[in-house]
Amino acid sequence: MNLKSKKPTLLLVDIQKAFLDDDYPGFKRNNPDAEIVCGKILLKWREKKLPIIHVRHSSTNIDSKLHESNPGFEFNDHVTPLDDEIVLTKNVNSAFIGTGLKSILDESKTEIIIIVGMTTNHCISTTTRMSGNLGYDTYLVSDSTACYNTKAINGEIIDCEVIYEASLASINSEFATVINSKELINLID
């Protein structure tokens, strides 16, 4: 299948400088090249002149690295939006809540959404699930996202790679098709 003919929209979610900080959120992270992969996909989308939407998280907590007053709020240099690209700002996990995203997608008659960004088990999972539930043909690019170690309810640390694999597995075939960036580029060329 050639995705290009269906004009898929690239949705870049929360690819912000806060995630570059070694102490965010205080735990080890997997897939340190996720933002680089996002940048390569963005360049391909621009080359093909396909629809692009950037979404950033604006925390309501002033102490958060993702609060608009902090440098971590800014877009990662690999995915800096161009002036003619849509930029939406959210303050919850789903890119669909409070942003007008669904209206934008419906007005442009979008059927296919490609999702990349941070973090796999938070805003990416929530946005991907909601995209699938809303009826969009949704693809999540596995190597464009990452997780952090997380403290379990019992206080033990769950390894980021376990969380990442479990998050992708729980999304795949249920809410979206999980593919890697090489597969995506093959589908778009």
Image (cartoon, rainbow, N blue to C red):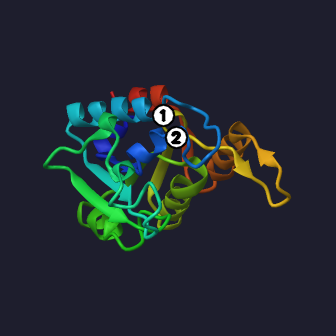
| Amino acid under disc 2 | Thr
- Quarter of the image that includes the N terminus: top left
SS for callout 1: helix
Q: Is there CB contact under 8 Å for labels 1 and 2?
A: yes
Residue 146 quadrant: top right
Q: Does residue 157 lie above or below 4 as drawn? A: below
Helix, strand or loop for disc 2: loop
Outermost residue, left direction?
83
Label placed on residue 145: 2
Q: Residue at x 81, y 61 (%)?
A: 153
* Residue 115 seen in this snapshot: no
Image quadrant where one finds the C terminus: top left
Residue 139 visible, this angle: yes
Label 1 sits on what residue type?
Answer: Ala
Q: How many marks?
A: 2
Image height check: is 122 above or below 61?
above
Residue sitting nearer the eye, 47 or 13: 13
Drawn side of residue 3 relative to residue 92, left or right? left
Q: Which residue is located at x 42 percent, y 72 percent? A: 97
Mark carried by residue 34: 1
Q: Position of residue 180 (x, y in %)?
A: 52, 32
- Which of the 4 image quarters holds residue 187? top left
For disc 2, the neighbor class at 10 Å (few under 14, some 14 to 19, many from 20) is many
171 vs 4, nearest the viewer: 171
Residue 99 coordinates in the image, percent (x, y): 33, 69
Q: Residue at x 62, y 52 (%)?
A: 171
Q: Position of residue 166 (x, y in %)?
A: 71, 46
